[in-house]
Amino acid sequence: EGQFGQDTFATNKQSIVAVGTRGMIASSHDGGFNWANQTLAGSLKEVDLSGVFVFDDGSAIAVGGDCNGLYATGPCGIFRRPSGTQAVNDQAWVKMPVSIDGAVGLDLKGLTAVTFCNVTNGYVVGERGAVLRSTNGGLNWGVVASGTVKNLLSVECAAGLSVLISGQQ
């Protein structure tokens, strides 16, 4: 069985999501007084989740896994929970599409962190210099050139749409 503690995110509206190993997801809509266990859909329940972001409306994005290469030979990805399902036990999170040069379905190795600058513009970082961007609230993701092959570990939004990314030297 998995363990929590990989990442936790809370909004000022009392929505909290905690993610962990082996697809562990717990969600609270009341500041942590009550929790609902949620899951990744189907065979993705073994994904080790490493990052999560929660929107003010309660929808959320989680990332993680290890694809063992450029195209999906292992479980990984970007997963989304719709708004209004924060308190639903066994709510399944859905894997979101990633495209590169118009080819849909690319899975990248080791996604580690996620953030949003506003309700539409979000970023995911990961191993081998992976940077992905969404301009529609996380419904679709495209690859952005990072200029590095080092592992990227953290991403945060600064003023406006400026993004700060940290990783290995």
Image (tube, rainbow, N blue to C red):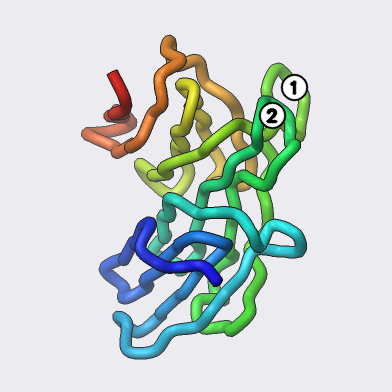
Could you tell me the amino acid type at mark 1? Answer: Gly
Q: Is residue 128 above or below residue 139?
A: above
Give the secondary structure at mark 1: loop
Give the secondary structure at mark 2: strand
Q: Residue at x 42, y 60 (%)?
A: 55
Q: Name the image quarter holding residue 84.
A: bottom right
Could you tell me the amino acid type at mark 2? Answer: Ser
Estimate how packed mark 2 is, as few (under 14), some (14 to 19) or many (20 or more) residues with alpha carbons within 10 Å.
some
Q: Is residue 14 above or below residue 94?
A: below
Instruction: For the residues labelled 2 and 1, say whether their Cβ atoms are less than 8 Å apart.
Output: yes
Q: Position of residue 143 (x, y in %)?
A: 57, 24
Which residue position holds label 1? Answer: 102
Which residue position holds label 2? Answer: 99
Q: Is residue 40 above or below residue 103?
A: below
Q: Position of residue 45 (x, y in %)?
A: 66, 63
Q: Nearer the viewer, residue 14 or 124?
A: 124
Q: Residue at x 36, y 57 (%)?
A: 7
Q: CA distance from mark 2 to mark 1?
A: 6 Å
Which quadrant of the figure contains the N terminus? Answer: bottom right
Which residue is situated farthest in the top direction here? 147
- Residue 105 vs residue 166: left or right? right
Q: Position of residue 164 (x, y in %)?
A: 27, 29
